[in-house]
Amino acid sequence: MNSADELEDRIKHLRVMTDDAVDQRILADASAALLKAQSVLLDARPSSVWRNIMRNQWARLAAGLLIAATIGTFTFHRQFATVAYALEQTLEANLGLRSIHICVEPAGSGMGESWATFDENGNLLRAKMYFPKTEDGEKEVVWQGDKAEVWFKTKGSVLVLRDKAASERIAKEARASDPKTIMEKLYEARSKGKVSIETQASTTEGVPIRLVVSFTDSPEKREIYQIDPQTKLVEKLQKYHLVDGEYKLTGSIEFLEYNQEIPAATFALDIPANVMRIDWTSQEVGLSKGDLTDDQIAVKAAREFFEALIAKDFGRAGQIYSGMPAKEMEELFGKIEFTRIVSVGDPTPHSDARTRFLQVPCVVEFRAGGNTHVKTFTPNIRPVEGQPDRWLIGGGI
Amino acid sequence: MIEDCELVRRLSQGDRDALKRIYEQHKLDLLRIGSCMLASRTDAEDCLHDVFVSLAANSTRIRPDGNLKGYLVTAMANRARDRLRGRNRGRPTADIAGEADCDFVAPAIDPATAMIAEETDERLYRAISTLPAEQRTVISLRLHGELTFEEIARLEKVSNNTIRSRYRYGLDKLRSSLGAGVER
């Protein structure tokens, strides 16, 4: 990169990752704001039609009758549709929740399907979650107690870990879409005046009760809950967003099976033999931080990782590199002959703070394909889940 | 420019297709500006969201003869700057970290490919993120926002010469930090 023009050109055309879900959200919210701006404009304009009607005595009488008739019809309809249902009935029905199977559409980058069991007090006992499309590709997670197994299906590896904080995050994710949590949140939102709920019910037996939920601060959002008239359990939650003047379905959660026995095999990952297994519960991985600062241990991990590759000590390199077994490390790195560490720079936080990585720029010399190369690598380094004193390289270099 | 005027005119009449077209035309450059200024894609997306909601909310007041890209770039830069100030006031980053769910990152499975790959844009982003905020703002507004130095000077409320210096120093620093990894 010698000329200024070349650098400017590369900056100008920097790749930008875009996300369809983000585009949709922005356009939906902007469309709602556009609609609101237009309606404010219309409200501010004198309504000539209305003014003309009200100037004419007969037309005024006709308009009055029309309004009265409309109100009457509306009131009649409301009385007819009102049935003896209260949200508290669903809350009470949820007390008997022991197991649930849920499907989320569209999953986006989040959970697509889950299975969970609960004890008699409603505490989560076991969970399995399926994520069809995350940044790591397709992923399955099973959780029980403080132990979790994460199968990175696209990347062909399984991570086993035991950690309270990680377990709490997984349990929180599993609980976020269980019907008990969802209905309790709805009840709380109504108590605080954040939502209003219209109950619609048919007199025909077996037809679900519908709760139409409007949001006080977000009129562009709407949710419809479908309640089983017999059990009072929620069967489906549909989410709508105002687009182009009408509410369009943006997603749904379907509560498929309440309190059905879930086979134990469901909570075990069916992992093919060729998938690499990294078990953080049975081995110490990474390096001990001791009295070092975060920056110091990150630099140390980066330096020792490349030193191990230069020495072809794949066991040592793998211990720092996510705890990967020596055999797999050799398969991945063995073809490259690392010769020298040119420099190790200062760590900087990863641009996505959620990853909690420190990135250490390392300039390394190596031979590959008969040529000598000097490249900058930036290992991502952070504490090990469940082994807080230890730090490792994760998510690639 | 004529097309911009037409789009703004249609937007002022509540045309959602015009809104979508403006979004598609400008989102990438605006995201580049946000990402360079804030060194965070999530924050850049949040700013982009605010810019377009605000554009739509003020659609009846925007002049069709104005510079649409300049308007959007200025709005993006202002929001990104506000966010930077918020960070400097010590906004807790734990909130951001707390949003991560099941964020275990799998080990990379193809490091050999990564080894022989050319310098990536990720590396350039990282190098930009190490520049002082003033320098990366000027570079991004100039290259992605296509603003003149005079326009950036007015926006940043500093002299034209200061802006030019920030731009030059920023590029020099980038060139020097990226130079280390060039294949020999």
Image (spheres, rainbow, N blue to C red):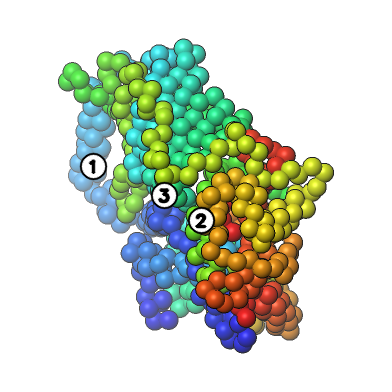
Q: CA distance from mark 2 to mark 3?
A: 18 Å
Q: Residues within 10 Å of mark 1 (few under 14, many from 20)?
A: some
Image location (x, y in percent) of residue A19: 43, 57
Nearer to us in this view, A338 or B122: A338
Q: Residue at x 46, y 12 (%)?
A: A120
Q: Identify whether A66 is placed above or below B153.
A: above
Label 2 or label 3, whichever comes before in sequence order = 3
Q: Report which residue position mark 2 lands on.
A: A331
Kindly identify which residue carries mark 3: A154
Query: x, y (%) of residue A93?
Result: 38, 15
Q: Residue at x 49, y 29 (%)?
A: A143
For mark 1, what is the residue?
A: A63
- Residue B86: image location, x then y, percent: 69, 54
Whether residue A218 appears in this view of the structure is: no
Residue B145 falls in image quadrant = bottom right
Mark 3, other Cα within 10 Å: few <14 / some 14–19 / many ≥20: some
Discs 2/3, front = 2
Dot 3: what SS? loop
Chain-order first, disc 2 or disc 1? 1
Q: How many marks?
A: 3
In whole angstroms, how far apart are the C-alphas of marks 1 and 3? 65 Å
Location of residue A342 in the rendering, given as x and y in whole percent from the top left corner:
72, 70
Question: Which kind of residue does numbered mark 3 sit on?
Answer: Thr
Q: Which chain does tag 1 point to? A: A
Residue type marked 1: Ala
Identify the subunit bearing mark 2.
A
Instruction: Answer with left or right where residue A288 lies relative to residue A379.
Output: right
Residue appearing at x 41%, y 52% in the figure: A21
Numbered disc 3: what chain?
A
| Quadrant in the picture for the C terminus of chain B | bottom right
